[in-house]
Amino acid sequence: MGSETATNTASTVDLEALSTLEFPIVEYEVSREKIGEYVAAIGDRNPVHSDVAAAQRLGYRDLVAPPTFAAVFATRPFRVALADPDWVSRATFDPKRILHGGQSYSFHRPVFPGDRLIVQSIVEDVYTKKNLVFLVVATRVDADGAERVLDATTTLIIRL
Amino acid sequence: MNASIPKIPAPPALEKCAVGDRLPTLERRIELATLVRYAGASGDFNAIHFDEAFARAAGLEGVIGHGMLAMGLMSEAVTDWAVDSGAVGELSVRFAGQYRPGDVLTIDGEVTGRTTDEDGGVVLHVSLTCTNQDGTEVLRDAKATLRPR
């Protein structure tokens, strides 16, 4: 991430500070254009993801975002936080030492163009294993009107 | 985006799928350009995914691919097969190994379980693998569930 924000030194991670980290709530509006960009980047050829008529033949109102399109918006609270030097100094870790350890999604319904999503993340768990700190971030995504769209769990690994 | 919209493939009758059914193999060569496009599309601009000098300074042997791109291809293998991507209930992976520009990722999957949910609906459980051309495991514990509509 941004190198100028990497002010923390290694092996000084404060687990208590990690467990109380908060993330900004992010709003995200889904567009056909952005889904199309994602589909092209991945190389996905499923017409349900790019052709409204094909999606409608399956009973959908519009084309369907690929499930992992969630990567575009579900990580935004974390990314916005990482871009804030004050947040990074509170976080006590060096952003350059983060690895993505695991990812899971649970979908309540597909994501469609026009969805106005509210993305909220919390720290669900912090634990250490050998020279690694595991930071588990739980993210819930609702459409406006508080309809749950998906839950995401991101496991980040900080190398000490 | 596409000059011609591909025909919708004949989907399997998901509700009839059985344990042992295999998904078609998805194979994809990853170029540096693939990673640059993915960075732009996903918003993940961590320079270890496109800047060789930055990646080396970060202690890597060179540019590595996005874990989430590998997960995206794993998801694509599932939705290419199922066609109805709205049937996907859960997706989960652990990022086990790195891959680099020039690597060919291969994703295979198999139906490993068939259960019913509290409403009596069928739930298919699919386990997948994602390796590069050397057999290095890129994703581990890659799993999906589908609820045929």
Image (cartoon, grey):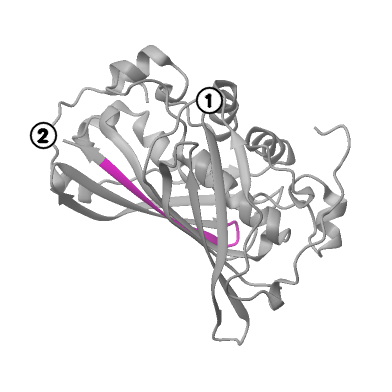
Mark yes or no: residue A152 visible: yes
Q: How many marks?
A: 2
Query: What label does residue B42 carry, if any?
Result: none
Using residue A58 as the reference point, say whether residue A11 is left or right of it. left
Foreground: B73 or A157?
B73
User: Share a chain, discs 2 and 1?
Assistant: no
Image quarter of residue B40: top right
Q: Position of residue B141 (x, y in %)?
A: 41, 57
Q: Which amino acid, mark 1?
A: Gly
Q: Position of residue B66 (x, y in %)?
A: 46, 34
Which residue bears the numbered disc 1? B102
Q: Residue at x 47, y 26 (%)?
A: B45
**Which region shows up in magenta?**
A143-157
Magenta residue check for A144: yes
Q: Quadrant of residue A99?
A: top left
Q: In the image, is B77 to the left or to the right of A8?
A: right
Amino acid type at mark 2 = Thr
**Residue A12 bears which disc, if any?**
2
Q: Residue at x 36, y 20 (%)?
A: B55
Magenta stretch: dominant secondary structure:
strand
Residue, x 51% and y 57% (percent of image)?
B128
Q: Is residue A101 above or below residue B43?
A: below
Dot 1 lies on which element? loop
Q: Position of residue A80 (x, y in %)?
A: 41, 34
